Image (tube, helix red, strand yellow):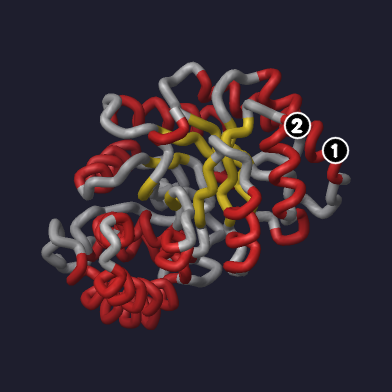
């Protein structure tokens, strides 16, 4: 099971209508578009998918749709963003009835930071309640788990199969890579540094760049795996320029715009997140044209309204 959760696993965007409802037809198109790019898995309900805005029933419905569309071709990871152990268990149980490979679960993220022992207990209770394997989504700035704490959890809890590192500090990634227990996985979400993350041994990625340009990220992964670092470095430079145009407080909206340029209409963000601005469009268009040169499956199209 663990080896299947490697490579490029994009966190799918969630298309919303102007009224804030999920556009299920558009979401199906996002799933199909992403899988067509040769990705190694997909993640639903992550940050790029605006998972923090989803009700439990909405998340479960998105998982249902995704598993229907994927039909076993690639593994599906379900994102769980919750502020208490009870809520994390409730959301996890709601999606566990579908054929998912893992849960991507954040530490709690409101103002009050639990102790290390409380965090260990949080994940222990979750894995006791739900049989689906857990990947810790290490993303909360004021509750960022240290490599030593992550190793402690992964060592003591067989239900936790890995971690997704999301801070921009590659040193923390490197420390984790040399201490991670055997058989566990480390996925990178350091979007600006996917190439060096892969080069030092990250087992794959769940991150915004793969959501926006999945074919390019597959090309990057493949280049590193075959040892073609010249090509990988060229892709990295283009990806970094692209990342710098979408990295903002409305990142999901920017990813949706980039998908639209590629012919995959991805809907609106959920309020109060604003849509991409005209200036963001201009910058994304320039960087996207450059980075898509590395996606052999893509011919850039006019943006979809």
For the residue pair 178 and 235, the one nearer the viewer reads as 178
Residue at 41 percent across and 43 percent down: it is: 6
Could you say where residue 297 lies in the image, as x and y percent from the top left?
Answer: 14, 57
- Say which quadrant the C terminus sits in: bottom left
SS state under label 2: helix
Res 282 → quadrant: bottom left
Quadrant including the N terminus: top left
Which residue is identified by label 1?
A: 118
Q: Is residue 296 above or below residue 235?
A: above
| Viewer-nearest residue: 66 or 173 | 173
Picture disc at residue 22? none
- Dot 2, how many residues are within 10 Å of its Cα: few (below 14), some (14-19), or many (20+)? some
Residue displayed at 47% across by 69% down: 193
Few, some or many residues within 10 Å of mark 1 (<14, 14–19, 20+): few
Please count the marks in the image. Answer: 2
Evaluate whether residue 226 shows in this view: yes
Q: Position of residue 257 (x, y in %)?
A: 33, 64
Q: For residue 165, which quarter of the picture? A: bottom right
Is residue 7 toward the left or the right of residue 45 in the image?
Answer: left
Question: Residue 23 location in percent, x, y?
Answer: 35, 41
Q: Which residue is mark 2?
A: 85
**Residue visible at 39% across and 62% down in the picture:** 209
| Residue 35, horizontal then vertical, whole percent | 25, 42
**Residue at 27% over, 61% down:** 223
Q: Secondary structure at mark 1?
A: helix
Q: Is residue 7 above or below residue 219?
A: above
Cβ atoms at labels 2 and 1 below 8 Å apart: no
């Amino acid at each position: 099971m663990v080896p299947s959760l490697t490579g490029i696993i994009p966190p799918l965007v969630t298309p919303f209508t102007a009224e804030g409802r999920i556009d299920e037809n558009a979401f199906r198109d996002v799933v199909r578009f992403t899988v067509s790019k040769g990705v190694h898995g997909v993640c639903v309900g992550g940050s790029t998918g605006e998972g923090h805005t989803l009700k439990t029933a909405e998340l479960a419905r998105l998982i249902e749709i995704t598993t229907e569309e994927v039909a076993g071709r690639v593994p599906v990871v379900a994102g769980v963003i919750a502020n208490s152990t009870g809520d994390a268990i409730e959301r996890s149980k709601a999606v566990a009835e579908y054929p998912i490979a893992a849960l991507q679960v954040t530490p709690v993220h409101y103002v009050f930071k639990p102790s290390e022992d409380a965090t260990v207990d949080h994940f222990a209770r979750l894995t006791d309640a739900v049989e689906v394997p857990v990947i810790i989504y290490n993303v909360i700035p004021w509750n960022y788990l240290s490599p030593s704490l992550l190793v402690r959890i992964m060592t003591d809890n067989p239900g936790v199969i890995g971690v997704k590192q999301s801070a921009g500090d590659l040193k923390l990634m490197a420390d984790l890579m040399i201490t991670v227990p055997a058989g566990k996985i480390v996925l990178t979400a350091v979007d600006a540094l996917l190439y060096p993350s892969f080069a030092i041994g990250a087992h794959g990625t769940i991150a915004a760049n793969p959501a926006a340009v999945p074919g390019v990220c597959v090309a990057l992964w493949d280049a590193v795996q075959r040892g073609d670092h010249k090509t990988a470095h060229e892709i990295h430079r283009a990806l970094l320029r692209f990342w710098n145009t979408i990295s903002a407080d409305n990142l999901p909206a920017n990813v949706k715009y980039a998908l639209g340029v590629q012919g995959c209409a991805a809907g609106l963000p959920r309020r109060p997140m604003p849509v991409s601005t005209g200036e963001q469009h201009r910058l994304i268009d320039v960087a996207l044209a450059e980075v898509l040169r590395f996606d052999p499956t893509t011919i850039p199209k006019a943006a979809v309204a």
